[in-house]
Image (cartoon, coloured by chain):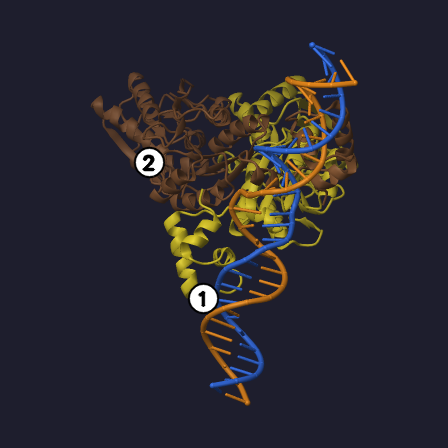
Chain colours: A brown, B yellow, C orange, D blue
Amino acid sequence: MVTLAKVAEAAGVGESTVSRVLRNHGSFSRKTRDRVMEAVERLGYVPNRIAGTLASAGSRLVALVIPSLTNIVFADVLRGASGVLEENQHQAVFSVTDYDPEKEEALVAAMLAWRPTAVMLAGFEHTEGTVKILRASGCRVVELLDLDGRALDLAVGFSNRAAGAASADFLLRRGYRRIGYVGHDPDRDTRAAKRFAGFRETLGAAGVPLVDTEIHAGASSVENGRSGLERLLARTPDLDAVYFSNDDMALGGYFHCLAHGIPIPARLALFGHNGLDIGRVTPQPLSTIRTPRVATGRVAAELVVADAPSQVVDLGFELIEGATT
Amino acid sequence: MVTLAKVAEAAGVGESTVSRVLRNHGSFSRKTRDRVMEAVERLGYVPNRIAGTLASAGSRLVALVIPSLTNIVFADVLRGASGVLEENQHQAVFSVTDYDPEKEEALVAAMLAWRPTAVMLAGFEHTEGTVKILRASGCRVVELLDLDGRALDLAVGFSNRAAGAASADFLLRRGYRRIGYVGHDPDRDTRAAKRFAGFRETLGAAGVPLVDTEIHAGASSVENGRSGLERLLARTPDLDAVYFSNDDMALGGYFHCLAHGIPIPARLALFGHNGLDIGRVTPQPLSTIRTPRVATGRVAAELVVADAPSQVVDLGFELIEGATT
DNA sequence: ATTGAAATTGGTAGCGCTGCCAAAAAATCT
DNA sequence: AGATTTTTTGGCAGCGCTACCAATTTCAAT
């Protein structure tokens, strides 16, 4: 293995000189620089950041602990974050919790062993243990895609409760009164649960009952959305609008309607959440709320890179009036 | 910061003893173990793997350099790999190349600075520089989702050429003769290009011409599939089947047909590639080829963890006869 | 030339851990 | 009890790098 010492020897200079040249830090003459670079090139030297990190301070490693990779939401966040991190010479490391808080704790602990600059997590709901080790670690913490709760350090996203309320408000103003809900496991996806809470609350405040609810125990998926709506309608056929826990579910509902010739929105209105691209190119664009997923990742990374003071950043959301309402 | 030395002092034992207990390696009495664990607990000690890695040999870090996170294919691979890696106390680190070989080279170089156990890449097409530093690094290399080429070390996936050929063969046997293609940038997504090559070759061998082709310069997406099919049909309305570069594109094509009342498959057949879940719950299930994406990630990780000898693993693919052909 | 300041350079002590070795303690056998 | 084996333990030298400091060289100013 080629080490810095060998490069130094090959170039006929001291180790610290090589280190300075390579990091472009401190002073050195043009001549030495060329000599060092030539040796680096010739030997094919790749600096060892493990050693570098140990010797200096920061690891320039950012840990992303996300609930799922199947859900495109988190892939988007990852994408936003990794772009910015890369531009700033940081490295993204990730783990998937499967929406399990205990697993999150274990993964956070494992991540902290790498002494990351920051840990990014989804939402505010963590085990006590997670909070404790995170606090003790002294590294920056960013909680993503949720604002309804108290932040540990940094938080970036939008209010799910507000998004749910806005969805309800929209359906009410459009005149829908027999409204149902098709969702997925609220215990695991607490952000979906918050949206639902905001939604129900707004309906309640308007004196409109939530007629029926169909909740699938597993994760959200197009398939579960389709079967969920099917079951809901079998039980309560006279609904005039259905709110879904997210666009995947809503898309499934939409497919159910297409397959069974249910006219949309004449006979039934559908409303999703997230504003996925695919929802814009279905025969009828999906009515939904567009969430700032990539921006959340991007902003979170920017805050971490800039070592910004603790703060909460509300990126908001945008209601998209498609053709399904 | 709590270090191993402090734990040792607190527990009244030597450093190496703490190290042994924590790694459950070597021998120690039950009594010391309890004493050490108590101190670890009390001080909230989290081992520093940066230091551990430097002192020992392997980093237990696996670098995944993938073209895109938007494409669910790679999210699936990541998922498969990260599950296995986690079970074996390895850490996944990733970077996104945006299908750019130069960027891939830069990212691989950056990754190697972390002295990973293995580097996983998509496909066989890399710059000379990438190959050179990979070779020089001495770490394991896994090339994913492609078998049509020469492997550097390990390769896991399926033959895209064969998949394209199988697709063509299927359409031919179903009696389609006026076949078109809607695809995305073949220079960047070389695996899609290989499928297309296999497809064309098989048509050619059967003496059936590929009637028309519409290639979008950008990445694949539902939207580009939809607009692509629209342009293709505007130019060549009398096609009886269209092969798409992947399911995202095919789904877009399907939506175009739904929106414009084009009967499927009576008037036009659609065939995709990947076998995404969503394609199974559309009103008419999509005819496609299911690829072993999660399995590819899983197997790749298993090989790396087991430090298996160089080999090529063909996971095959499965043709799914949906209702669009 | 002589001096002082500035630029450049090398030596070396860690960073926190693991691996090795030898010492000490405990267990087993004559 | 003494001898021998086995288990348990601590000390310490690195891993490859960076940070700091002191030494050296260069340069401009007197």
Nearer-the-camera pick, D26 or A301: D26
Nearer-the-camera pick, A184 or A32: A32
The residue positioned 56% from the left and 40% from the top of the image is A54
Where A31 sits versus B152, above or below? above
How packed mark 1 is, by other alpha carbons closer than 10 Å (few <14, some 14-19, many 20 or more), is: few
Image quadrant holding the C terminus of chain B, namely top right
Cα–Cα span, label 1 and label 2 = 61 Å
The residue positioned 32% from the left and 23% from the top of the image is A162
- Secondary element at tag 2: helix
- Residue extending farthest to the left is A207
The residue positioned 61% from the left and 49% from the top of the image is B58
Q: Which mark is on residue B29?
A: 1
Tell me where residue B121 appears, x and y as whole percent. 66, 39
For residue B263, say whether it is visible: no
Where A155 sits versus A220, above or below? above
The amino acid type found where label 2 is placed reads Leu
Tell me where residue A85 appears, x and y as whole percent. 55, 28
Tell me where residue A53 appears, x and y as whole percent. 57, 38
Q: Which mark is on residue A232?
A: 2
The amino acid type found where label 1 is placed reads Ser
How packed mark 2 is, by other alpha carbons closer than 10 Å (few <14, some 14-19, many 20 or more), is: some
Q: Which mark is on residue A150?
A: none
Q: Chain of mark 2?
A: A
Q: Chain of mark 1?
A: B
For residue B42, say whether it is visible: yes
Residues at discs 1 and 2 both on one chain: no
**From the viewer's perspective, is B139 left or right of A93?**
right
